[in-house]
Image: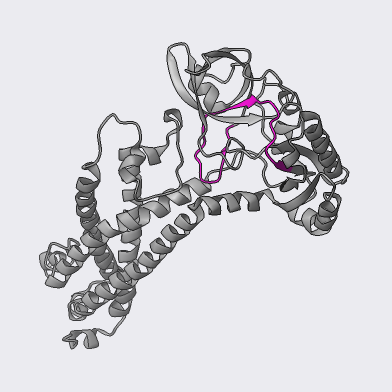
Amino acid sequence: MNNKEHTSFFNLSPLGGSWRRGNLWLFLELIVITIVAWIVFDPAIVNLYYYSLPMGYDHEQLIYAEATDNIWPDNPNEQTWDHIRTQATSQFESFEEVENVYFYKSSFSQIGINDGACYTVSSGKDTMYLAHIDFYPDIHFFETYGLKPLPGSPKAEELSKLAEIGRQAVLTRKAAESLFGTTDVLGRHFKHVDKEKGDCDVTVAGVVEDIRASVSANMQSIMFVPEKLLWYDIRFIIRLKKDVTPQHFIAEHGREVKAKGKTEDWRITKLTTFDEFLQQKELEKGNTQEVNRSLAMALFFLLNLCLAVIGTVWLQAKCRTEECGVRRAYGATKLRLMLSFLAEGALMATIAVIIGCFIFLNYAYSGYIPGTSYGKDYFNAMYYTCCFTPLQDQTWVDHFWPHFLIVSAVVYLIILCTVLIGTAIPAFKIINSKITEALHDNS
């Protein structure tokens, strides 16, 4: 057999002799699929990214309790409210499984329901935003939530006792690094910029590890500040001991907790795990529906993508049964034929994705203004869970080019895997057929 002839038969390039009109249609189909895949998969990728981030604190041992009062119309004084808080807290602490209890008002500036409350702060010449979460002094805030002080910072119990309202703050790691460039900031000062009340000098009393204020939020630069005990309604966060699960505690003691919570002044109306509380907040904000919708669309599109590509590739491969028979008659191995099929499919998918992403880039980049703050403005219609993010907390999602390149890479891998699987299945059947049958196949 002529070696030159043998080599030409196994040209791996789809642009060579094996390139047919059917391949051209598949190539054009893959370009269109790439553009649609980018739009469909982008929100699913971003949502999964946000929901995969760690919360940053020990939320698995927490219970959320909600109560209503029976004396609000009478406008009670602070002593009356303090009596209610002390009474309710002592009832929770009477259970052996309970380790700590934190009482707070219903507010958007709380862990689990933070919706982007921010303070403007400055250190030297730098001015930036820090997300703001307030806490009531001496009611076990840091130890109940399980926030983790950095080495050199006071313990959680000491941080919970901070009482200089408006004059002290606890920073997260990211906030400390944003303001001062280091986490060794104990005792340092920065200004809380307030145009109405005037600037206020704030002392850093401690630094804790980064947390996410809500399930759909990014890791933010946060300042925790002591706040005066204001009364709106009654909320409790209960930390259980390590060997007790929230589900077990509620199942065993839920009725007893609610029974003890029925007094003349207040009564327990809701008792649930903190994780269920977080999920409920996401549901109320509409994030859960949007995430589920984006994932459902992505899965539906992926299923149809697989069926369409595999079906098209199967038909094209079947048309090459006779060609495979000829190649095998000239001495081609089954492995060589399989690699030829896969290489052709991979090259075709790669070129199609590059062209498809380039076409989509022209659309996406048309709204891009270099130097502007938020990359999410250009993809605002494509994902939903990202809340307000200060500049120093932005991730790849919030920047145009990293966002575009990462999602494009994921789209490429999905389409490449689909094409390779769709190619391998019929190719395996064809190359394992008898040579005589393949040579007589005129399909």
Residue 370 placement: quadrant: top left
The reply to whether the magenta stretch includes residue 225 is: yes
Location of residue 341 (image quadrant): bottom left
> In the image as oriented, which residue stretches furthest toward the front?
74
**Of the pair 343 and 232, the residue shown nearer to us:** 232
Q: Is residue 181 visible?
A: no
- Identify the residue shown where x is 32% and y is 79%: 429
Residue 274 in percent (x, y) is at 67, 48
Task: Classify residue 308 by image quadrant.
Answer: bottom left
Residue 29 at least partly seen: yes
Q: Main secondary structure of the magenta part?
A: loop
Which residue is at the front of the view, 324 or 346? 346
**Quadrant of image for the N terminus:** bottom left
Q: Residue 311 appears at what percent x and percent y?
A: 28, 75
Q: Is residue 392 left or right of residue 436?
A: right
On the rendered image, what quadrant is the C terminus found in?
bottom left
- Estimate the x, y position of residue 298 in percent, counting from the top left: 39, 61
* Above/below status of 253 relative to 219: below
Identify the residue at image location x=53%, y=16%: 197
Q: Is residue 235 magenta?
A: yes
User: In the image, which residues are magenta?
Assistant: 210-237
